[in-house]
Amino acid sequence: MLIRKLFKFENAHIVRNCTSKRCSQSIHGHSYKVELFFRSDSLDRGEMVYDFGLTKLTIKELIDSFDHAITLWSGDDPQYLKDMKKWSQRWVEIPVNPSAEQFSRLFFLIVDKILNQTIMVNEENNVCIDSVIVHETDTGYARCDRADAYSEKMGFIDLSKVKFSSGVIEEWSDPFIWERLLRGEKIENPKIV
């Protein structure tokens, strides 16, 4: 069975090397919608694939890290990166160009990591991320599945290279959650949200 959870955030970026001059040469923003599709072959104690309330914890916090922030590509001009970090309290630096396609792959990998490291305590079984859709505009989106997320042809995404500003981290309920996930530490779902 498949379920869907929608998240929204406002974000600014530049997509270097793309064909559109406006997108590749000017900072601009979007009202993003991120659809996460979860799959399981069984239901939990509440007869659900995965309680939507649980998605409002680590998953929501990490996606919300991009809200009212600028997303920077670590391969961009070093002076540009320095200036953006100087003038924005909220930024996320990622190891790939911040296109809708790469956002969808990045969010897939993040949610996959969270689910793989979560101790399920509500009788959830085999819950996995099936696909991610990132709507950059009302008329355009990118959809990513597992094969896309882990595709070497589309570029390896090293999650250890994702950096969050202190302005983002200070808003997390656990300021060490990203470090803990990168170290492979387990996180336990609550029985009640």
Image (tube, rainbow, N blue to C red):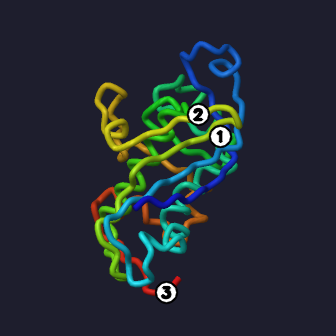
**Residue 173: where, in percent of width, then height?**
54, 72
Q: Viewed as shown, does residue 178 lie left or right of 146?
A: right
Residue at 44%, 39% (x, y): give it: 144
Q: Which residue is mark 1?
A: 86
Q: Which residue is mark 2?
A: 82
The residue that label 3 is drawn on is 192
Residue ID at (50%, 33%): 101
Above or below for 62 versus 83: below
- In the rendered image, which quarter contains the N terminus? bottom left
- 25 versus 177 height, above or below: above
Marks 2/1 in contact by CB < 8 Å: the verdict is: yes
Mark 1 or mark 3, which is nearer to you? 3
Among the two numbered marks 1 and 3 on one chain, the one whose residue lies closer to the N terminus: 1
Q: Position of residue 90 (x, y in %)?
A: 64, 49
- Inspect the image, locate mark 1, and give the three-letter code of the amino acid beneath it: Lys
Q: Earlier in the sequence, mark 2 or mark 3?
A: 2
Q: Secondary structure at mark 2?
A: helix
Q: Secondary structure at mark 1?
A: helix
Residue 25 relative to residue 186: left or right? right
Amino acid type at image mark 2:
Lys
The spot of residue 190 in percent (x, y) is: 43, 82
Crowd around label 2: few <14 · some 14–19 · many ≥20 (10 Å): few
Alpha carbon separation for disc pair 1 and 3: 40 Å
The span from disc 2 to disc 1 (Cα, nearest Å) is: 6 Å
Q: Nearer the viewer, residue 189 or 85?
A: 189
Identify which amino acid the numbered label 3 is placed on. Ile
Closer to the camera: disc 2 or disc 3? Answer: 3
Relative to 69, does residue 188 appear above or below in the rendering? below
